[in-house]
Image (tube, helix red, strand yellow):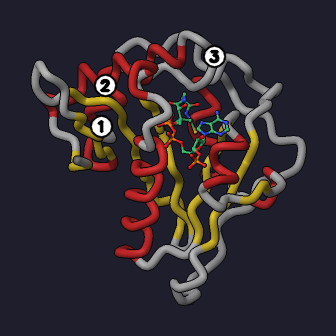
Amino acid sequence: MIRPATVHDVPRIQEIINSHAGLGKMLFKSLAQLYEDLRDFAVYEAPTPAGPVIAGCVAMSIIWADLAEVRSLAVDEAFMGRGIGRSLVEWTLAEARRLQIRRVMALTYEEAFFRKMLFQSVAKESLPLKVWSDCVRCPKRDQCDEIAMVRLLTEVAPVEAPPAVPTPSGLSVPVLDSTED
Ligand SMILES: CC(C)(COP(=O)(O)OP(=O)(O)OC[C@H]1O[C@@H](n2cnc3c(N)ncnc32)[C@H](O)[C@@H]1OP(=O)(O)O)[C@@H](O)C(=O)NCCC(=O)NCCS
């Protein structure tokens, strides 16, 4: 029921994400952003009497040799509580294993949900600078109240790679006023 997203799915992905963004739970996504990142996305198709509908989506982006990020995880409100969120997170973990990436992170308000997925809270400063690229589009700016969480895949071997640029303390980022395409 989970498959890689195609261009046909983008309007529906945007609808689901932006329904939660309107409630302040995640960032709005423009069509331009979604098309650009489409290869990162998977969708969950749920059967309904009217035919299959996309009930949720997730994206996994690669931050570094040892770090991937669960992004844009969203389940349509009408389909919540049926294990779809869990399946989508498991899809990202399977992708990380396939790519031999040992840690998967999320920036989230859904701490209890991610704990169930065996993620643990970490200090934001422990994540590389590259993680904060979306902050330029976030209205919360320097008052970021998302929780950083990481799942370590112990079955994936550590990788030899130069370290990512660390997050400097007291980081401040410029903020865009608009997310127009
Ligand atoms: C968070 C979200 C993806 C969960 O999706 P879902 O399909 O309802 O979750 P599931 O049914 O797969 O739940 C899996 C488990 O987590 C639990 N759970 C789900 N949401 C939870 C929450 N908000 N708090 C605590 N536990 C939660 C479920 O009870 C279930 O537990 P169980 O396995 O012991 O029965 C969904 O609520 C959502 O889209 N939220 C808005 C967008 C968002 O915040 N996304 C995260 C961005 S990082």
Q: Which kind of residue does numbered mark 1 sit on?
A: Glu
Confirm or deny contact between disc 1 and disc 2 (CB under 8 A): yes
Q: Using the image, determine if residue 143 lies above or below residue 161.
A: above
Find out whether the residues at labels 3 and 2 contact each other: C-beta distance under 8 Å.
no
**Which residue does the image show at 41% across and 51% down from the upper left?**
87
Q: Nearer the viewer, mark 3 or mark 2?
A: 3
Query: Disc 1 on helix, strand or loop?
Result: helix
Which residue is label 2 attached to? 32
Depth order, front residue of 141/118: 118
Residue ID for mark 3: 24
Displayed-image quarter of ligand 1: top right
At which x and y percent is residue 5?
22, 41
Kindly identify which residue carries mark 1.
36
Q: CA distance from mark 1 to mark 2?
A: 6 Å
181 vs 149, nearest the viewer: 149
The Cα atoms of the two marked residues, 1 and 3, are separated by 23 Å
Task: Rate crowding at label 1 as few (under 14), some (14 to 19) or many (20 or more) other CA atoms within 10 Å.
Answer: few
